[in-house]
Structures are given as C-alpha cells and as structure tokens.
Image (cartoon, rainbow, N blue to C red):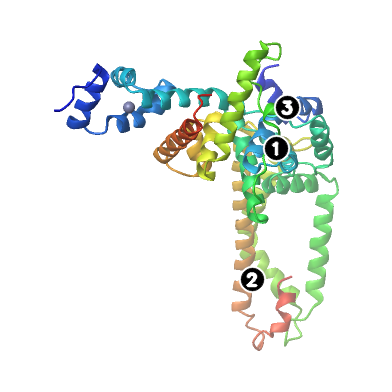
Amino acid sequence: MEPGVLLQRVGAGDELAWEAFVRQHQGRIFGLAYHYLGHAEDARELAQEAFVQIYRNRHSLPDDSGLVPWMLCITRNLCMDLFRRRKARPPTWDIPVEELGHLAAPDGDPEQQLHDQSRKELVHRALRELTDLNREMILLKDIQGLTLDEIAGLLGIPLGTAKSRSNRARLELAEKLLARGACP
Amino acid sequence: MSRLPSSLPDLTASILARTSGPTCGRLRALACDLVDGALPPDDRDLAHRHLEHCPDCRSLVSRLEAASEVLLAFAQLEPGAEFTAAVLSRTRLAPPFPAPPQDRLLVGWARLMRRPRAALEAAYLATAAGLILSQVPLPGTQHPVGSALVSRVRTESRASLAGASSRVQAWTTRAKAANPIRLSHHRNSVWSARWSRLIRRIGQAWLDLSNAARKTRVRFWRQPPTSTSAPAEPSGSASRSAL
Ligand SMILES: [Zn+2]
C-alpha cells in the first residue's frame, strides 16, 4: 500500500490502517526514545504515549514527507518533558548491543556477523561517551536521517549552527573511535 | 640540516610544517562533507591528495565513514512483542479527537437551527419578554417599561437588528447546507478555508448584533422619556434593564 493511502485511511479512522501504521513506525519511535532515555522500559512507555498523541491528531497528519520529522518531534518533546519533570537519571543503556539495529543479514557469514557485531559495539560505546548535545545531533542526523533543515526547525536553531554542531559531533565520535584504537 | 628525511612523505611533511598553515585542520573541516559526498570537485581532489600522504587524516576519515554506516542501523529498535498491542489498547481508550473550537461552534449552531421548533420557540420567547416588559413599571414612575421601551426599540433598532438578523439567517442557511448530517474535520483544506471564511462572517454578524443591542440600550437609558422625572438609574435594576 502506498504510504499516502495508508495515511488517508488512518485519517479516515480505519483501525486496521492504524495498526499497520503503528507497526510500520514503532521501531523508529522506540529507537529515538531509547537513545534519548537510555532505559528500555521508559522508552517503551514514552513511545506508547507518542503514539497516543499521534492518534489524537490522526485527522490532520502531515503529508508523507513531513510525517517522520513530525513524529520524531513529538517523541523528542515527550523526552524533554520527562527530563524536566523528573530528575534525569543516568542512562543505563540496558538493551544488549547485539539487539541494537539490524546491520547484518540474519543468514550472512558468521564471521561477517561477528565483525558487524563488534563494529556496532564499538560505535555504540563511543556514542555513549559523547556529550548530550553531540549525542542528540548524531541521533537526529546520522541515526534518524533527518536533514539539517529539519533539525534546525526541530531544535529552533539556525541552519548554520545545526551544520557546525553536526560536524563537531561526528568528529568527536570519530575521535572516540580513534582513541579506542580499532577501526570499526 | 643534520639529517636527510628518510622518505618522500616525510620530506613533504617537514616542508609543509615549515611553510604552510595547519593543513590537517583544513582537512578536518572538510572531512564530514567529504564523507557525505558533498564537497565541490576541486576541494574533493585536494582532500584526496592530502589523504594519500597523511595517515592521521586517513584514520579520521575512515572512522567517520564506518560510523556513518553503523549508525544508520540504530535508527529502528525492536520494542518487544507486546508493544503494538499495548499501543492499540491505549488508543482504543483515547478520547475521540475533539473538533477544533470553531467547528464545535458551527456544529452547535447548525444543530440548534435544524430543530423544527426553533423559530416557534424564538417567537414564544420574544412574546413573553414583550409581555413582561409591558407590565413592569419604569423605575421611579408608574409608566410601564414596555410602552417606552418597545416604541424606542422598534424605532431605533429595527434597521440595524434587521440587517444583523438577515446575516445570521444567511450563515445559518449555509451552515445547514454545508453540514447536512454532521461535521467532520477535513485534512485537506478547501473545506478548512471555507470554514474559516464562514467563521469570520459569523463573528462579524455576532459583532453587529451585539453592537445593535448596545446602541439601543445606551440610547434608551441616556435619554429617559421626557414625561417622567426619573431619578438616576439604581444599580440594582441594571440587570433587569439588560433584559
Ligand atoms: Zn592530515
């Protein structure tokens, strides 16, 4: 089904379309929440709340190109609210690294899988060492794939600032990897 | 010079160290765009030439490339088998989407006006009000309010009230026509433009109506009937006069 058709049917109140919509986007919403919060259970709870908010606005969803940035914005705002409401507790990153992402094909060469696994492990460790500001930039641009324009809009900063922050964050990550010696 | 450099790259490096600025810093500033393929061809060419001879910058760029590739895989995480069902049960309980305030106003008005007895009820209320007013004496006099009030209202506000009420009638007709069964909130926005135009007109009509009522009240109480020597209006009767 075309994404636009799915959106129309969600907007028209089709509950089956809504279920398909949730399944299609839940990995992304949960992924963003987890990388902000660092706790799987908190992230699950928050992602559910994000879907409730999306559902309440289902009659006026953005078009297909604006949908993902809009949903990520809702999720990020909920994360920021949570940080404000409760004293932020230090993230524990309690999802095992092997369950993060789907880099290797499941039926791929075992040696290749091991290699991919260790790359993910290395990058994830380096990511956890970044400052919050730099990790957020990596999260929005390099993980979620938002454009610099979309990030500037989301964070309310000028485009030039978004670009320089993004570059700084990526360089910091690369340096963390360098400091660990191995190339992922 | 006590010692010759042992290889060509070292020679280049030592020349650069003595003649140029921080070339690695310049490469660093371009590195992200290089990895993203966003550098203009000339800059890309110069960057590659630097990389051929600078192992440190090569390491940096290779980490940037590897990180970009791995990070994309972190975008989606599996939230667990129960997640979808949990969302669906929460959204089943979520209250229905509330119509925006302007739509609610319009729905209410259209529903009211669609009642078959609405006109009859309005006429009944107007008659009752007229009867009551004709029996209540004007403060400080024996003259009933009705005789003075009704004649003034009739003469001074007929024109403006008629204008306002014809507008109200017009948009009522529209609300009913545009809204035959029930209003739904449309995403795509020919309708929403029409709604907002209609709402502006409703607002204008309401403003006209309330202006007319205020004007009438102000004129009436500012010039009390000459046949009476009414004292200043006691504040306690203000609420009744507002009727
Ligand atoms: Zn260099």
- Name the residue that disc number 3 marks: A21
Quadrant of residue B220 within the rendered picture: bottom right
Looking at the rendered image, the quarter that the C terminus of chain B falls into is: bottom right
User: Secondary structure under badge 2?
Assistant: helix
Check if mark 1 and mark 2 are on a common chain.
no
Q: Chain of mark 1?
A: A
From the viewer's perspective, tell me whether residue B60 is left or right of residue A105. left
Mark 2 is surrounded, within 10 Å at the Cα level, by few (under 14), some (14 to 19) or many (20 or more) other residues, namely some
Disc 2 to disc 3, how far (Cα)? 58 Å
User: From this viewpoint, which residue is outermost toward the left?
Assistant: B1
Residue at 69% from the left image edge and 83% from the top image edge: B235
Horizontal and vertical percent position of residue A138: 52, 35
User: Secondary structure under badge 1?
Assistant: helix
Height in image: A10 above or below A73? above
User: From this viewpoint, which residue is outermost toward the front?
Assistant: B2
- Name the residue that disc number 2 marks: B217
Disc 1 to disc 3, how far (Cα)? 11 Å
Mark 2 against mark 3, which lies toward the viewer? 3
Please state the quadrant of the image where ligand 1 appears: top left
Quadrant of residue A161 within the rendered picture: top left
Q: Is residue B156 something one can see in this rendering?
A: yes
Q: Amino acid at mark 1?
A: Ile
Mark 3 is surrounded, within 10 Å at the Cα level, by few (under 14), some (14 to 19) or many (20 or more) other residues, namely some
Height in image: A19 above or below B185? above
- Name the residue that disc number 1 marks: A54
Residues at marks 1 and 3 touching, judged by CB atoms closer than 8 Å: no
Height in image: B241 above or below A166? below
